[in-house]
Image (cartoon, rainbow, N blue to C red):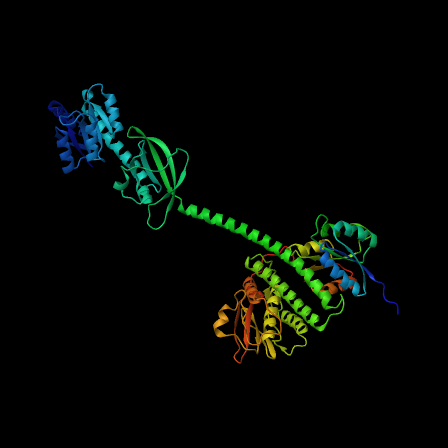
Amino acid sequence: MEQRVRVLLIEDDPDYTMLMNVFIDEACGENVKYVLETTVSLQGGLDLLSRQEYDIVLLDLMLPDSRGLDTLIKVRAKAPSLPVVVLTNLDQDAAGLDAIGHGAQDFLSKSKLDSGRLRHAIGFALARDRVHRQMERLVEGAPDGMVIVDRARMVRYANAAALALFGRKREQFVGRLFDYELTPGQPVIVKLPGREDEEVSAEIRAGELEWKGYPAWVVAIRDVSDLKKLEQVRAEVRERRHTDKLKDELLSTVSHELRTPLSVVKAVIGTLRDHLAGPLTADQNDMILTADRHISRLTRLLNNFLDLTRLESRRARINRQPLDPLALIEDVCQGVRMASRGRRVTLRLDLPKTLPSVRVDPDMIAQVLGNLLDNALRYARGRVTVRAEATEEEVEISVTDDGPGIPVERIGELFDKFVQLDRARGGEGYKGTGLGLAISREIMTLNGGRIWAGNAPSRGACFRFTLPLTSRTAPPPREDTPHAQPAA
Amino acid sequence: MPSPPLKRLLIVDDERDLVRPLALRLAASGLYDVSVAYDGAAGLASALRLRPDIALIDLAMPGFDGWRLCERLREDPRTRDTKVIIMTAWLSPDLGRRAKAEGVARLLLKPFEEAALLDALEACQIAPQPL
């Protein structure tokens, strides 16, 4: 297939123009056909360039209306993507090289011109132009921003990614000042104001290069916002861990510092209460009993507070194991029965003969059931009932009292910290800590169960919780430390 | 009927205000011959001299602490059979494991109920095995 090359010759010497016509004709071959158009002035050339399409320009730099490199610059400005071969006079190689620095693809010495050289020069210029364009496309399409900045810090070129990063149009960016620090080999992170919604963190790296014959910077700009965010999250996690550790240490210390004087007061009051330091009057006895109750309350509060903190920070040691829920219920109920001897409340167990095995931490679940029974016994009029039943996935245990029930509007906040409902029949001098249900909820979450509350159909409050069946849970990772349970 | 011989009991705790009511209570029970010491070194000296049946030891004491005292009691033939009850206000995660390793008979977390103390003392006299 024949290739047609449209050549524009801008040349004011008519002899040379004629000669060029001859060479061009000679240069045409089977595959390539050159079509020459000529004009004698820069202005004529610019007019033609705006009206017609060409593949290449042959340009004499010395024209009646323009002389020297300025001629080339004006042609390039008119048709930036058109390859230009500059025609020079004898011994003007320096001028030719200068022209290449300003964007010419090649130069030809007029005195040495023949058809072979002309064909060669045109072919070479077109090929070089193709390579050049390919490089430009490569840079233009690069995912990182690429900017050429001259030594006066003016932007000479910016690719699409750079414009997108800075949020500017080409004409708002190229030709303007590049106002960021440039140190070769030293990347800097800057905030780009570009986008409307959020700041962009960009890493700017600069290298030196020659651009159109002058020293310049090539600047690569990469969006590192995501990396920055990741770093920020990492730092936050580190900080959080550190804070948690400090919190643990603080709690541990505070706990010790509180326990020591508490143990002294408890022992001293116990000595007085038991008349070990001499007899007491009835009033003194009464006062001491009150003090004793409140010491116990303070101790419970401290223990509950520590429990809850440990549970909430997920630092509690959990030791889930297969367990017979019936045995657990009976154990806890027996303990509660002994502790509540003398009270006029009956604890009734309404349990099936067998229940499937559940996988939970026995001490934790005993604490939950203990809490619920404790609450129920405080509010019950005469009876507390414990029931249990199995579904396909879990065992559900309920504790129901026959007290005043829970005001419906407060059921939602029941499991929050330090919530104590002033139900009509609270019990006899005993004060809860307001943490029992919050602890129970944390424990149930850790053990893969749920806990909730409502009112019994007849009257009274009903608390329910579920324990996941062993057959429905994956065996947990082996615990390498036994569950430390000091006598307390 | 002659009463059974008193058990020799040593309390070691730098918190004198706690030692006093504890000693008072245990002496008043009529079951124990109670001695006290207020630091680990004095506790060791008393223990080697008195060979107590039971030692009630606080863990956190300045310098010579409760764990060190436990070790020394275990090492010496005169006190090897002394039953040790640890009292502590520090609830550390490895407390149980360490107590077991040191051959401690019972752990009491301060503050503790009198019943828990009496229970621990009773266990020391009945159960020959440590934890």
Residue A431 located left or right of residue A142: right
Labels in figure, total:
0
Residue A472 located left or right of residue A118: right
Quarter residue B12 falls in: bottom right
Residue A220 located left or right of residue A108: right
Relative image position of residue B29 (x, y in whole percent): 79, 66
What residue is drawn where x is 72% and y is 68%?
Answer: A273
User: Which quadrant is home to the C terminus of chain A?
Assistant: bottom right
Front residue of this view, candidates B66 and A49: B66
Front residue of this view, candidates A441 and A340: A340
Relative image position of residue A52 (x, y in whole percent): 15, 37
Relative image position of residue A210 (x, y in whole percent): 32, 29
Q: Residue furthest bottom?
A: A458
Front residue of this view, candidates B100 and B57: B57
Quarter residue A366 falls in: bottom right
Task: Please tell me whether residue A247 is drawn above or below residue A347 in the rendered image.
Answer: above
Relative image position of residue A192 (x, y in whole percent): 35, 44
